[in-house]
Image: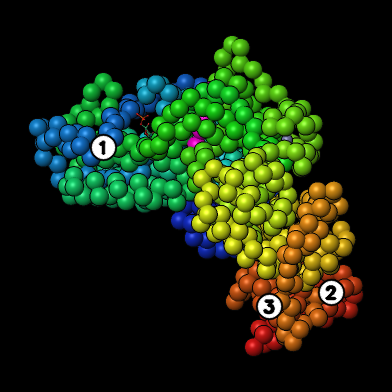
């Protein structure tokens, strides 16, 4: 076989594998095998100086271009008419029924990306063009060439123009933002920005995708319906969009509801559904207005993202003294609710998102109650920078900046901290004192001068009766609840102290690792860092807390008040009693945290890295360097099977 034939064969094979991987999401060979073939092709291309027009090596991105050329579309692109409710959809159908009686509709996702039209001639990818004004668009061939799922050659040999939506998957966006200096605000802008980048290598970094839903122009074959268009696209190896055929408008509405329900679980953004008359002969009869086809309509869902103005930024002081900025917004409707405020995690977040007072920002409804600001979108004259605070807005005390967050260190005198701590102390997973709400905590502090949690245990009925809204019964109940909380566990006690960065899980880890309060109090940095999932920041928070004036008074005060802390149950007779266990690699029959819980229950302690103190290493699949270290130190290593055996 001559070298060119060999290269042809490699290109065909690689394209076939890429199709299974990127379009069908169903790889048929391993990454390693793919990489080997790919490297072989690269070598041959270098040796011969020949690169086939559909070679996968073109997907890494070519030379920087100087400008986008204008290209006229063979078939004009239209916008879509829009409806927002079931009533409006039925209204749209009534207008259609005046002219024709369609045989059915397709319902598709309305992808929220940017339109791309790809031209193929003689089975070869020729060019990709943006929508532009619908008549003339910009040539973005070099950019689209980098998209892995786009076929560079197709079986169909006539001239054809296919339309799809360029987009960035949300998982890709997340991956990209994990290391990006400047995070991308949303997937649509991210995709549009990448396509409009003159350097295709930059486009390649964003790992875009295109999902196809239309055949705008075709020579040498007649398509009769939208369903046939989808068949054509699939046969020619394009990634096709979601499409369901519905016989009547009621079925259309049912499908739209289904899509609305599942849209949040998709890996890309959609902002609605597109309903299209299926049969092309009816489409021709219906025709176009000067803006959109009469045979299609977009059913728009309620916006998930919207822009509004930041009127002000205020800072809330939390129970650990941490200050969290909260943006006060001009009220807007978002997913059926009025939004007036949004979080901005910390000062660094404000800078990264370039938020100024008075500017316009993009806001997204997240799973939390308070929506999130994605970034600034527009500035106006006179917009003010948001300055870093130097004084606590609640108490006027100087602030400490740990390079991400601001803290008020006035533990004793800062009201929101005191009240927040009392409320947290009483909460369900902490000391579980029923009836001690935020409101009550505020009263106890303001009226009765309660600063520290232990002062709760010295309250009398006479004290409570002085508070507004407290009659005998309510006072008694609260006092009883306070008394009852005196018997507690180490885990609850540690959590109740409101140490920064120590939540329920870390409190429980601490209790399990050290067993008694004395041991926790005398823990060293080294010991703390050994605990799985404990890092520098958590370790510092713990040491700082117990070393502080406030921490010392708080702990001693509670013990003096008669709080009894029951140590962690250490199962001395358990199957892992006395063992210091390290896990490495992944287990197949249970998750690592399940396995760790079992070890703890059986009296063992979990460490995160192998040291001389380790007594046992449990090794699963894909083990890392921990195993080498264990061997070096001569520590016993067991596999998953033996681990399960020991638990039995
Ligand atoms: P609009 O720009 O809001 O009028 O909506 C028209 C745009 O919707 C088109 O330019 C396409 O980019 C986009 N679109 C997304 N999904 C589809 C789809 N399934 N069918 C047709 N257009 C779609
Ligand atoms: Zn303060």
- By secondary structure, the bulk of the magenta-drawn segment is best described as strand
Image x and y of residue 50, in percent: 62, 42
**Which residue has dot 2 on it?**
614
The disc placed on residue 528 is none
Label 3 CA crowd tier, 10 Å (few <14, some 14–19, many 20+):
some
Decide if residue 364 is on the left or right side of residue 495. left
The residue that disc 1 covers is: 85
Using the image, determine if residue 209 lies above or below residue 428. Answer: above
Image quadrant of ligand 2? Answer: top right
Question: Circle 1 — which element?
Answer: loop
Residue at the image position 32 percent from the left and 27 percent from the top: 78
| Mark count | 3
Residue span colored magenta: 360-364
> How far from the left and from the top, in percent, is residue 395?
72, 32
Q: Residues within 10 Å of mark 2 (few under 14, many from 20)?
A: many
Q: In front: 416, or 531?
A: 416
Q: CA distance from mark 3 to mark 2?
A: 18 Å
The answer to which quarter of the image holds residue 199 is top right
Q: Which residue is mark 3?
A: 601
Q: Position of residue 83 (x, y in %)?
A: 27, 33
Residue 568 is inside the magenta segment: no
């Amino acid at each position: 076989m001559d070298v060119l034939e060999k290269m042809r064969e490699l290109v065909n094979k690689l394209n076939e594998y890429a199709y299974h991987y990127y379009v069908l999401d169903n790889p048929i060979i391993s990454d390693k095998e793919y990489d080997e073939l790919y490297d072989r092709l690269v070598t041959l291309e270098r040796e011969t100086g020949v690169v086939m027009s559909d070679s996968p090596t073109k997907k890494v991105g070519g030379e920087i271009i100087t400008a986008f050329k204008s290209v006229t579309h063979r078939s004009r692109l239209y916008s879509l008419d829009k409806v927002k409710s079931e009533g409006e959809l039925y209204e749209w159908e009534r207008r259609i029924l005046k002219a024709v009686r369609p045989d059915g509709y397709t319902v598709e996702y309305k992808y929220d990306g940017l339109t791309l039209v790809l031209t193929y001639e003689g089975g070869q990818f020729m060019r990709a063009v943006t929508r532009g004004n619908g008549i003339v668009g910009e040539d973005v061939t070099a950019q689209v060439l980098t998209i892995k799922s786009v076929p560079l050659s197709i079986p169909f040999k006539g001239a054809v123009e296919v339309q799809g939506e360029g987009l960035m998957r949300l998982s890709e966006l997340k991956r990209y933002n994990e290391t990006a200096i400047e995070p991308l605000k949303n997937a649509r802008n991210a995709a549009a920005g990448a396509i409009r980048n003159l350097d295709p290598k930059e486009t390649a970094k964003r790992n875009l995708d295109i999902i196809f839903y239309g055949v705008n122009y075709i020579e040498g074959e007649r398509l009769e319906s939208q369903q046939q268009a989808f068949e054509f696209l699939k046969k020619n190896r394009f990634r096709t969009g979601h499409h369901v055929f519905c016989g009547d408008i009621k079925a259309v509405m049912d499908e739209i509801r289904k899509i609305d329900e599942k849209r949040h679980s998709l890996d890309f953004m959609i902002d609605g559904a597109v309903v299209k008359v299926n049969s092309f002969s009816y489409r021709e009869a219906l025709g176009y207005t000067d803006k959109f086809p009469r045979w299609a309509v977009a059913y728009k869902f309620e916006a998930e993202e919207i822009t509004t103005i930041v009127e002000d930024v205020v800072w809330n002081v939390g129970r650990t003294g941490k200050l969290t900025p909260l943006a006060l917004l001009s009220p807007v409707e978002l997913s059926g609710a009025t939004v007036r405020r949004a979080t901005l995690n910390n000062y660094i977040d404000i800078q990264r998102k370039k938020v100024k007072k008075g500017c316009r920002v993009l806001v997204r409804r997240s799973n939390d109650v308070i929506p999130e600001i994605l970034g600034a979108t527009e500035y106006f004259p006179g917009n003010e920078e948001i300055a870093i605070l130097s004084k606590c807005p609640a108490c006027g005390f100087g602030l400490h900046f740990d390079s991400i967050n601001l803290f008020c260190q006035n533990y004793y005198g800062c009201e929101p901290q005191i009240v927040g701590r009392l409320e947290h102390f009483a909460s369900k997973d902490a000391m579980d004192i029923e009836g001690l709400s935020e409101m009550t905590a505020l009263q106890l502090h303001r009226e009765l001068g309660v600063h520290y949690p232990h002062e709760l245990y010295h309250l009398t009925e006479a004290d409570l009766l002085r508070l507004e809204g407290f009659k005998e019964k309510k006072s008694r109940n609260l006092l009883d609840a306070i008394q009852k909380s005196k018997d507690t566990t180490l885990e609850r006690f540690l959590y109740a102290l409101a140490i920064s960065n120590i939540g329920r899980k870390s409190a429980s880890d601490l209790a399990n690792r050290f067993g008694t309060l004395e041991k926790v109090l005398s823990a060293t940095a080294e010991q703390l860092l050994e605990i799985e999932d404990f890092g520098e920041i958590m370790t510092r928070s713990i040491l700082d807390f117990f070393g502080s004036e406030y921490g010392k008074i708080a702990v001693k005060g509670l013990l003096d008040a008669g709080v009894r802390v029951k140590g962690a149950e250490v199962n001395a007779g358990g199957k892992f009693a006395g063992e210091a266990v390290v896990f490495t690699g992944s287990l197949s029959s249970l998750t690592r945290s399940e396995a760790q819980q079992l070890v703890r229950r059986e009296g063992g302690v979990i460490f995160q890295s192998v040291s001389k103190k380790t007594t046992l290493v449990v090794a699963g699949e894909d083990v890392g360097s921990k195993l080498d270290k264990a061997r070096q130190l001569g520590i016993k290593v067991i596999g998953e099977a033996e681990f399960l055996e020991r638990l039995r």
